[in-house]
Amino acid sequence: MTCVSIDINHCGYYNPRMRRIPCIAIIGAGPAGIAAAIQLVRYGYKPMLFEKNKPGGLLGNAFKVENYPGFPEGLSGIDFAEKLSAHLKKYKIPVIMQEVKSVVHKKGQYIIEAEKKMKADILVIASGTKPKRLSLSLPARSLKILSEIYAIRNERHRTIAIIGAGDAALDYALNLCRYNKVILINRRDQIKGLSVLSERLKTEIRNGRVKYLRNAVITKIEDATDGIYLYVRRNSLKKYFCHHAVLAIGREPALDFLPRSFLKHFPNGNRSLYFIGDVKNGDLRQTSIAIGDGMKAAMTINEVIESLNYSKLLKGKPNLDPPLLKGNPNSDPPLLKGKPNSNPPLLKGE
Ligand SMILES: Cc1cc2nc3c(=O)[nH]c(=O)nc-3n(C[C@H](O)[C@H](O)[C@H](O)COP(=O)(O)OP(=O)(O)OC[C@H]3O[C@@H](n4cnc5c(N)ncnc54)[C@H](O)[C@@H]3O)c2cc1C
């Protein structure tokens, strides 16, 4: 998709009645951030949506999404990501293609440091997860060790090792083994992934397209011409060549840009700070949940703004500290008052 460059001063703009509309920033244009952006635009806000990589987020790596209601035939992750981008385009929502490096909260506003510093009154964090790393020293060619498959999805006739045996590992193996030889390396005895994926994997193992190593521990990684060697200990130590290795050994929240104090004081956000999607969902990482979170955050933000007569508050002096930093909308949003919070605590899980 073409990402439009925008005048960031459009944010916190004045509407025709000269009321200042709060500036909302969203970090991450995966399913959660996109859902929030679309709904906010439908309310008439103009959110700033930051993305460091590609709109659509992790979905770009998924082989086939078969559990999203309404698509009984399933949808490839890439098609899904493209549909999300098309939805942004339809609503003319610009994506600021910049990595957010840091966020600080000062005088009632969030100062977001990307290529420039920008200010927002309300911040939505939809930054998803980052891969866990192997606790091994990596060789010079560590570029051959990937944690997503987007870059190699068109590779043919290669040997690709997948490290892990959860849903993502199985999805990668089933995707890549169509045109390559896959070695799936599981340090455990059992496969952890969904049974429907395990069954498909068994077929590919029988067809010889996937070599499956269980109770297998990688002890060393070494450079090779055009690839790397993995030293794998099972009953004995064996060396395997692969052109690429893909790590799928778990993920953790991508929150490096956020000060620890934020998380300490507002682990579930507050009325000006929202965590949505995989970044806060622990093991419950699914597209439909992320999209639901985005929708819920947008509706809550609108409710908060309306209930505080926010635009009036902002007229003149845009300081939202007192009304917004009180309370916690993720656990007790105005819309859900009285209902228990079913959100798992941030950073838990994995
Ligand atoms: C192999 C695989 C298969 C999957 N299959 C399915 C499936 O079949 N069904 C299903 O429901 N789900 C599936 N998922 C899970 C699904 O992809 C995620 O649940 C979903 O993408 C989460 O959306 P999100 O918006 O919360 O996070 P993400 O999709 O991770 O998006 C976060 C976005 O934030 C951006 N970002 C992060 N930090 C910054 C920063 N500092 N500055 C700017 N941008 C930033 C990232 O680049 C990314 O685009 C699969 C995942 C994988 C890996």
Image (tube, grey):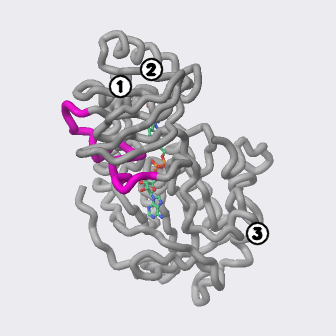
Disc 1 marks which residue? 174
Q: Amino acid at mark 2?
A: Leu
Q: Is residue 264 above or below residue 1?
A: below
SS at mark 1 in the image: helix
Q: CA distance from mark 2 to mark 3?
A: 45 Å
Horizontal relation, residue 125 to residue 213: left or right: right
Q: Which residue sits at x=69%, y=71%?
A: 324
How far apart, in angstroms, are the residues tagged by discs 2 and 1?
A: 8 Å
Nearest to the eye among marks 3 and 1: give it: 1
Q: Is residue 256 left or right of residue 145?
A: right
Q: Nearer the viewer, residue 155 or 80?
A: 155
Between residues 209 and 265, which one lies in front from this camera angle? Answer: 209
- Identify residue for label 2: 197
Mark 1 residue type: Leu
Range of residues picked out in magenta: 138-158
> Which secondary structure lies at badge 2?
helix
Location of mark 3 (residue): 326
Q: Is mark 2 within 8 Å of ligand 1?
A: no
Residue 222 x %, y % = 39, 46
Quadrant of image for the C terminus? top right
Q: Amino acid at mark 3?
A: Lys
